[in-house]
């Protein structure tokens, strides 16, 4: 069968590549065409456009690139119709993908599957109308989404587990290097590591990294190591590093988490990854103006937490410092607890175990592929 996939960022490229590999195991004649990235290309098929050509985030960048965005949407729609796949598989990235779903539903008979559902439970809940109308099958990777979609909105979905569990498990099975080897390979100091994961987008890095560095730089017995995002240049990071003593590692986030003693993490999938690697963390998310955003968060957002760790557990496991609570002093206080308070560390690690139980076992891409092929063969 012919599968057309659309992703819009690095995490989607990772998840989609594993789904494609699983689909090849279930369907020996699988053909792929996609808007994606290098990891998807490594699995096979034809890349129409790289996700880096789509990834405009924030009001001003989107406004400045509207012509390009609309041109990409138009080209994607035309390409799908011309290739006539057996299914279109959308991966997260709702701003782009829901528009594609609307077109495919209205103009063709091609089924639309959504792998990694849009997070409409947090904001833009009104999009459920579009999903019900335009998406034939939705595959969820977060357990609490089952209640949201099926009970609240009467829309049946497939919970297939979380692919990050698979990705971390595979890494841990195949990488058993020592701390000594890791620091030697990267020319690091022989000190415990505080990992900094400041997000994958320029605005997140600009807003969060300076305060993270200032907060973490007062612990002389530890070294700071920053996980570089694949789409961000070294030059961009250097604008915000200043005189801080910090090492930047690109393409080594999992290696870094495997060796870190603690982490400062901007909210996103990285919070879940840190938890699965059992790294005590503080979630840092600066928003400006802080107090206004805090008010909006309390009264507009539909969820109690912003980190996936707390959302999955449905209780506070990791400390979230958001908007007006995201200050250097607060980050430093929470980080000090994680470094020197053994009781605090063990409480968080116990919470991670509970969260992992709720996520379920590895095997999400395989379960999704089996279900997709079965549905398509009906």
Image (cartoon, grey):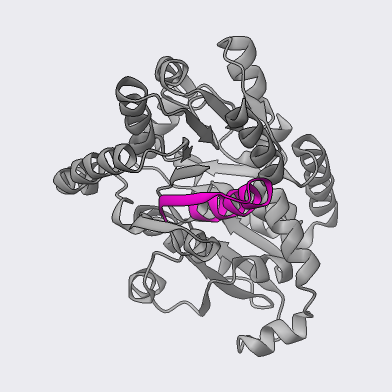
Is 39 on the left or on the right of 51, as rendered? right
Residue in the foreground of this view, choosing between 309 and 231: 231
Residue in the foreground of this view, choosing between 279 and 72: 72
Residue shown at 67%/73% (left/top)? 193
Residue shown at 61%/30% (left/top)? 377
Is residue 187 positioned above or below 295 on the image?
below
Residue shown at 41%/73% (left/top)? 241
Q: Position of residue 76 (x, y in %)?
A: 29, 43
Residue shown at 18%/44% (left/top)? 71
* Extreme residue toward the front, this view: 29
Residue in the foreground of this view, choosing between 319 and 118: 118
Write the start and end of the magenta stretch as one range.
12-36
Question: Quarter-wise, where is residue 289 in the image?
Answer: top left
Q: Position of residue 50 (x, y in %)?
A: 35, 58
Residue in the foreground of this view, choosing between 242 and 28: 28
Is 362 on the left or on the right of 184, as rendered? right
Q: Quadrant of the C terminus?
A: top right
Q: Position of residue 211 (x, y in %)?
A: 46, 59
**Magenta segment main secondary structure:** helix
Residue 311 visible in rendering: no
Q: Is residue 20 magenta?
A: yes
Is residue 58 positioned above or below 176 on the image?
above
Is 122 on the left or on the right of 352, as rendered? left
Q: Is residue 87 magenta?
A: no
Number of on-image labels = 0
Q: Position of residue 25 (x, y in %)?
A: 68, 51
Residue 115 visible in rendering: yes
Is 143 on the left or on the right of 218, as rendered? right
């Amino acid at each position: 069968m012919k599968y057309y996939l659309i992703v819009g960022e690095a995490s989607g490229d990772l998840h989609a590549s594993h789904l494609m590999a699983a689909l090849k195991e279930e369907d020996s004649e699988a053909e792929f065409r996609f808007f994606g990235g290098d990891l998807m290309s490594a699995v096979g098929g034809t890349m129409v456009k790289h996700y880096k050509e789509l990834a405009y985030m924030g009001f001003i960048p989107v406004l400045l690139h509207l012509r390009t965005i609309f041109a990409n949407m138009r080209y994607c729609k035309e390409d799908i119709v011309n290739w006539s796949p057996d299914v279109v598989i959308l991966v997260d990235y709702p701003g782009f993908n829901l528009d594609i779903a609307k077109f495919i539903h209205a103009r063709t008979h091609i089924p639309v599957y959504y792998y990694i559902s849009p997070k409409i439970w947090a904001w833009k809940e009104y999009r459920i109308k579009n999903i019900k109308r335009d998406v034939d099958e939705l595959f969820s990777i977060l357990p609490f989404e089952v209640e949201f979609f099926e009970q609240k909105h009467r829309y049946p979905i497939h919970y297939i587990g979380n692919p990050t569990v698979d990705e971390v498990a595979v890494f841990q099975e195949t990488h058993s290097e020592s701390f000594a080897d890791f620091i030697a390979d990267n020319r690091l100091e022989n000190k415990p590591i505080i990992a900094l994961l400041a997000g994958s987008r320029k605005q997140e890095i600009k807003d969060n990294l300076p305060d993270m560095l200032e907060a973490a730089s007062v612990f002389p017995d530890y070294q700071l190591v920053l996980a570089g995002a694949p789409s961000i240049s070294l030059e961009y990071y250097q604008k915000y590093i200043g005189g801080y003593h910090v090492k930047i590692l690109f393409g080594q986030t999992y290696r870094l988490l495997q060796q870190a003693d603690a982490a400062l993490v901007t909210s996103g999938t990285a919070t879940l990854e840190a938890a699965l690697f059992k790294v005590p963390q503080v979630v840092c998310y600066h928003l400006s103006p802080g107090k206004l955003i805090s008010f909006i968060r309390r009264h507009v957002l539909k969820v109690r937490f912003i980190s996936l760790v707390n959302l999955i557990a449905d209780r506070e496991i990791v400390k979230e410092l958001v908007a007006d609570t995201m200050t250097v002093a607060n980050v430093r206080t929470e980080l000090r607890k994680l470094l020197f308070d053994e009781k605090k560390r063990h409480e968080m690690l116990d919470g991670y175990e509970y969260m992992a139980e709720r996520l379920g076992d590895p095997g999400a891409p395989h379960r999704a592929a089996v279900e997709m092929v079965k549905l398509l063969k009906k």
